[in-house]
Image (spheres, grey):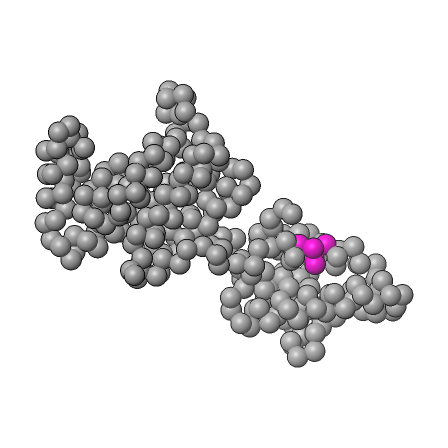
Amino acid sequence: MPRVVPSQAVAVIDRMFTWAAAQSMNPDSACPMISLRQLGQIVTILNLVRQVPEELLPLDSDRHMELLAGVSSLEAAVEAWQGGNKQYHVVTVPGFGPLHAVTLVRRALASCSDEAPSPKTTQLPFIGDQALRDSIRLDMSTAHQDLAEGEWKGATVLAGSAVEALLLWALQEHETQNAGARAGAIAALRGSQPPVLTRQPDANPERWDLHEYVEVAAQLGIIAADTAAQTRLARRFRDLIHPGRAQRLGQKCDRATAHGAIASVEAVARDLTPP
């Protein structure tokens, strides 16, 4: 079933019931009655709400209750009309003030974000910065979603981006606790035969590429050897977001690169999670 985001549902409600937006901002405005003639529009709203992923529905308890109350009222109307009660009308919902049932649904959906990680996404509790944690989890969640939908490039690139973000965070945390260790690891990698790092990384690790993140993290023992090996296989596809590079190298993202990139980010997250 196609995925519907809250803003899309709100836009459809506004097209069918132009008064709902105004009433959500001014509860004292007119509250029209909805009758059997609007059965099709009500069924459309209910179908849209059912297609919004659970993780995008309102977390605020008041808005969540409004959504449940509004949807239940609309479902009761549909049941009454289909049961032959042609005189049934939908207006307000008892206990929820002067707002129409449609307005309750609209207001709840308007409070939602169009992006949120799936509850099944790896939690990353070791990252204390909630904004950073949520951002990485969103990339991971969307990568899994793209994989399920056959969007190989999206899954590959987003998973690679999440790997970079996790390793950057881990390297910065490690340096905070072990000042100077990163420079020693870089020196070792530059001095190996053949050298693992053929150039001196930028002094600012935020400017590194995935190759540098992986090798330095592996040298420091931040990620396991098998995780580093898995990520090395996936890392070259991280740069294929640039069409010119993909064409020049004759490479493309496919099911294998998507699975490989997602395996990499899950392995890195596993290694960073405290026992």
Q: Is residue 152 above or below residue 107?
A: above
Q: How many labels does the image show?
A: 0
Query: Residue 13 vs residue 174: left or right?
Result: right
**Residue 40 in picture, x, y percent from top left:** 78, 55
Q: Where is residue 58 in the image (x, y as percent from the top left)?
A: 54, 64
Main secondary structure found in the magenta portion: helix
Q: Residue at x 48, y 46 (%)?
A: 144
Indicate yes or no whether the magenta region holds residue 28: no
In terms of image quadrants, where is residue 48?
Answer: bottom right
Based on the displayed image, in which of its 4 quarters is residue 21 positioned? bottom right
* 131 relative to 85, above or below: above
**From the viewer's perspective, is residue 158 above or below residue 84?**
above
In the displayed structure, does residue 28 sit left or right of residue 175? right
Among the 4 quarters of the image, the one containing residue 233:
top left
**245 or 19: nearer the viewer:** 245
Q: Image point 42% across, 48% down: which residue? A: 139
216 or 84: which is nearer to us?
216
Q: Give the range drawn in magenta.
A: 44-48
Seen in the image, is 273 located left or right of residue 155? left
Task: Give x and y (percent) for residue 112.
Answer: 53, 59
Q: Which residue lies furthest to the bottom in this view?
A: 95
* Residue projecting furthest to the front: 226
Residue at the spot 52% in from the left edge and 58% down from the top edge:
55
Point out residue 256 in the picture as x, y percentages from the top left corner: 45, 34
Question: In the figure, is residue 128 to the left or right of 34?
Answer: left
> Can residue 81 be seen in this snapshot?
yes
Q: Can residue 14 be seen in this view?
A: no
- Frontmost residue, 260 versus 43: 260
| Residue drawn where x is 22% and y is 44% of the image | 218
